[in-house]
Image: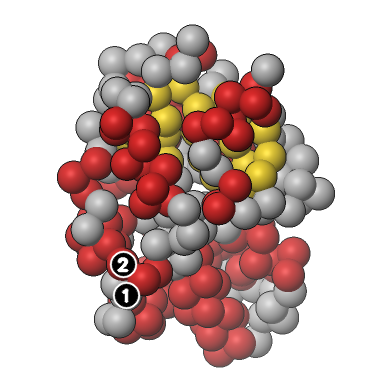
Amino acid sequence: QIKGFIFDLDGVIANTSLYHGQAWHQLADELGVTWTEDLANQLKGVARMDSLNLILKAGGKENDYTEAEKEKLAAKKNENYLGLLDSLSQDDILPGMKEFIEDLSAHHYLVSLASSSKNSPIVLKKLDLAKYFDGKVDPATLTHGKPDPEIYVRGAEVLNLKPEECIGLEDAIAGVKSINGAHETSLGIGDPKILNEADLNFNDTSEVTLENIKKAMD
Ligand code: BG6
Ligand code: MG
């Protein structure tokens, strides 16, 4: 029986995955690494340093920078990203997600956050959604980021639920893998060809309702 929902943030609750993508794209251009749709999809959901390493690898530049230089590059991307968040407001909540989260509260489901982003507190605050979460995983405390299962394992633990009692919601390949590895039910939001490992699939956030989820699980 499902008792809890574990949410990714960027690309599931807010359209901020777009801004992460823009900021990484700009850095890739500056580093002379070709930006492709495939690279963009690989980066989704992945922690900051792991993302930079994937970009450098894609350009065959994985040995060109010291750790200190990489820290600077990652910090530059983050400054850029934070600039893009300046005008973030409740209008940036993806269609139907506020209503869905409110509906979960009304039906006494437990809700936690499993975002890789160290900026998630800022984003949730700007969207005025922090109050709906019964628990949050702090990505700074993780040993391994997505696609490792750790963050979704912890997402259930903070709710005192068993993995099989939880549904994880993700827009990213790395996130779906993490949910599956944690033995929870994965709900992929986006192109089913890309998120083909998800247990359930919805093309768009507006389709994510309790009713549709119940139908899909039957
Ligand atoms: C994920 C995003 O939620 O967080 C990734 O999908 C991002 O694009 C990752 O790289 C880490 O975010 P941050 O804000 O800590 O750099
Ligand atoms: Mg995401």
Compute the Cα span from label 2 to label 1.
7 Å
Number of other residues with Cα within 10 Å of mark 2, as a class: few under 14, some 14 to 19, many 20 or more: some
Q: Is residue 208 above or below residue 128?
A: above
Crowdedness of circle 1 by 10 Å Cα count: few (<14), some, many (20+)? some
Residue linked to disc 2? 90
Q: Is residue 40 visible?
A: yes
Question: As drawn, which residue projects farthest toward the right?
Answer: 193
Q: Which of the colour schemes (rainbow, by chain, secondary structure, one colour) is used?
A: secondary structure
Percent from the top left, x then y, of residue 204? 62, 54
Horizontally, is 165 left or right of 35 in the view? left
The residue shown at (32%, 75%) is: 88
Whole-percent x, y for residue 201 in the image:
68, 40
Q: Secondary structure at mark 2?
A: helix
Residue name at image x 52 percent, y 71 percent: 18
* Tag 1 residue: 88
Which mark's residue is nearer the viewer, 2 or 1? 2
Q: Quadrant of residue 123?
A: bottom left
Residue at 29 percent of width and 16 percent of height: 160
Quadrant, the C terminus: top right
